[in-house]
Every structure is written in structure tokens, then in C-alpha cells.
């Protein structure tokens, strides 16, 4: 399902699928008096609880150290990684940050996709 969310004067077109939300498009919001705002969908939007997300992860979760957008996912489920391997490239405040493997292991699950917007502490993948 697609929703349009306005935060701090910006419209975010968000696509929600299987408990995952991805920003499709961002535009500047028009100034509209509150009484003229019309809901996009009758269904209420409830954010996924971080505790629920942690329960579905098979393995040790790797969390995002800062908020930003995932520019690249460099691994696939089942891939063996060594400590220091670059798993993701995250863009935050126009800077690219490499998210590296904290230890040797096998990627059991990837939670985020390229283009996903993440917050600090969001789970990116599970490592076994």
C-alpha cells in the first residue's frame, strides 16, 4: 500500500509491503490550512514495534548506527563475511558511511533493501 506522509513541511510517498516501508518520492508540502487536509487512506497506519522486529530476526542483529538512506546492499543471505567487510553503504547528511561486519559470520537474513530509509537502531541484517 502507498501512503503520503507529511513531516516538517515535506511530503513523503511511502510504500509499505510485508512490514517494510520504503520512501518512493519526496516533495515539498504545500501550505494547506488544517481543516482542508484529507486523509489518503481510511486504514490507520501504525509503525512496526522495534521489539516485534527483533523477535523475527534469526541470528545476531546488526543495527544502523545513524539515520539515513541505504545506497547499497553488498551481501546476500547465506554469504560468508569477515570482520570489516563492507555490508551496506548508508547516506546520511550527504555523506556516505560504510557499515562493516562486526565479526566473521554468515548472513542469515537481510532486513532492509536499497533505497530504504532507516533510523538509528533499526535492524539491517542478521548475522550467524
Image: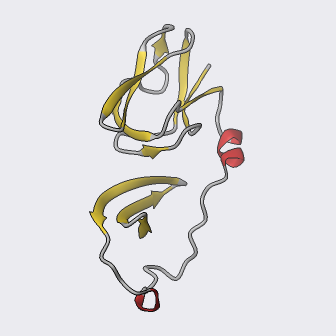
Instruction: Name above or below for residue 108 compared with residue 112.
Output: above
Quadrant housing the N terminus: bottom left
Q: Residue at x 47, y 57 (%)?
A: 17
Quadrant housing the C terminus: top right
**In the image: residue 99, left or right of residue 105:** left
Q: Residue at x 68, y 39 (%)?
A: 54
Please state the horizontal and vertical placement of residue 9, each as a whole percent of the image. 37, 67
Q: Is residue 29 visible?
A: yes
Please state the horizontal and vertical placement of residue 97, each as a whole percent of the image. 38, 25
Please state the horizontal and vertical placement of residue 113, each as a whole percent of the image. 40, 40
Colour scheme of the rendered structure: secondary structure
**In the image: residue 96, left or right of residue 108:** left
Instruction: Name above or below for residue 107 compared with residue 109.
Output: above
Q: Residue at x 55, y 78 (%)?
A: 43
Q: How many marks?
A: 0
Q: Residue at x 49, y 7 (%)?
A: 82
Q: Can residue 1 be seen in this view?
A: no
Please state the horizontal and vertical placement of residue 53, each as a whole percent of the image. 64, 45
Considering depth in this image, is 97 or 58 the residue closer to the camera? 97
Amino acid at each position: 500500500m502507498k501512503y503520503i506522509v507529511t513531516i516538517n513541511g515535506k511530503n513523503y510517498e511511502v510504500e509499505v509491503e510485508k512490514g517494510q516501508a520504503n520512501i518512493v518520492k519526496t516533495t515539498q508540502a504545500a501550505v494547506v490550512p488544517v481543516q482542508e487536509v484529507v486523509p489518503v487512506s481510511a486504514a490507520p497506519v501504525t509503525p512496526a514495534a522495534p521489539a516485534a522486529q527483533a523477535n523475527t530476526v534469526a541470528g545476531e542483529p546488526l543495527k544502523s548506527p545513524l539515520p539515513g538512506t541505504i545506497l547499497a546492499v553488498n551481501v546476500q543471505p547465506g554469504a560468508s563475511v569477515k570482520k570489516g567487510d563492507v555490508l551496506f553503504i548508508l547516506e546520511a547528511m550527504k555523506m556516505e558511511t560504510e557499515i562493516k561486519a562486526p565479526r566473521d559470520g554468515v548472513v542469515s537474513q537481510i532486513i532492509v533493501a536499497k533505497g530504504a530509509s532507516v533510523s538509528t537502531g533499526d535492524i539491517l541484517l542478521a548475522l550467524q
